[in-house]
Image: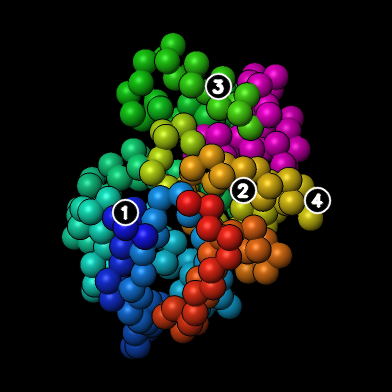
Amino acid sequence: MNTPPVIALEDVRRTYAMGDGVVHALAGVTTAFHAGQFWAVMGASGSGKSTLLNLLGCLDRPTAGRYWFDGEDVSLKDDDGLSEIRLRRIGFIFQSFNLIPQLSVQENIEMPLYYQGMVAEESAQRAAELAERVGLGDRLQHRPTELSGGQQQRVAIARALANTPRILLADEPTGNLDSHTGEQIMNFLQELNQQGVTIIMVTHEPHIAAYAGYQLHMRDGVIDRIENGADHA
């Protein structure tokens, strides 16, 4: 692609001290993710895929190597700098939904906007629009416990989209769903991607990874191989 990547990694490494030894969770990863792409990151337990997603989401920082986000080197940013990127440029979808049970659907979707300082009237309107987009426009005042698992994940997706992120990171987004509901969520993510949303998803399920246009396979902290499918960019 001729356009600059949203994310670029150069020889990224992440090590952890464990007892008297060192664990090389990432042992030198160089790759790039462009706007409009849909990636599935795969690999066995301990392959480094979760560590990679944490670094991409600015929840952690590399031990060595360079990480560029929209051309900005974020490798050495302090915690406040990383928090700002997470707040304004990244949307997160988790396996366990991570909704706040005491809050309504509307209030859960509004959470990122609250931290951005958006005025209440605007954030309420944004939440209503996003709830409608994920098919829950009539559930705004419901609590998460009043929703099915698939509906809760749709609320989580709406919340992830609230700040109009540059990239959407999904960690096993169908892991807590039955197969039929999981397919519905994946079809929805695929629709979002076709509308231009950039997605990087960790999964261990080949049939879930098949929804993505690209598959990045990790092994022992490095990229084992990359497979290209249908490019939605």
Residue under circle 4? 180
Amino acid type, callout 3 = Glu
The colour scheme applied to this rendered structure is rainbow
Comparing 3 with 218, the one in front is 3
Q: The residue tagged with tag 4: helix, strand or loop?
A: helix
Image check: 7 left or right of 203? Answer: left
Please identify, in this view, whether the residue under mark 3 or under mark 1 is nearer the observer.
1
Indicate the amino acid at tag 1.
Answer: Thr
**Which residues are the magenta region?**
135-160
Q: Earlier in the sequence, mark 3 or mark 2?
A: 3
Crowd band around label 2 with a 10 angstrom C-alpha radius: few (<14), some (14–19), many (20+): some
Are the residues tagged 4 and 2 within 8 Å (C-beta)? no
Q: Earlier in the sequence, mark 3 or mark 1?
A: 1
Q: What amino acid is at disc 2?
A: Gln
Residue 90 in view of the camera: yes
Judge from the rendering whether residue 52 lies leftward or rightward of residue 12; answer left or right: right
Q: Secondary structure at mark 1?
A: loop
Q: Residue at x 40, y 40 (%)?
A: 165
Circle 3 sits on which residue? Answer: 129
Q: Position of residue 26 (x, y in %)?
A: 38, 77
Sort mark 1 into few (<14), some (14-19) or many (20+) by Cα contacts within 10 Å: few
143 part of magenta stretch: yes
Q: Are marks 1 and 2 in contact (CB under 8 Å)?
A: no
Residue marked by disc 2? 190
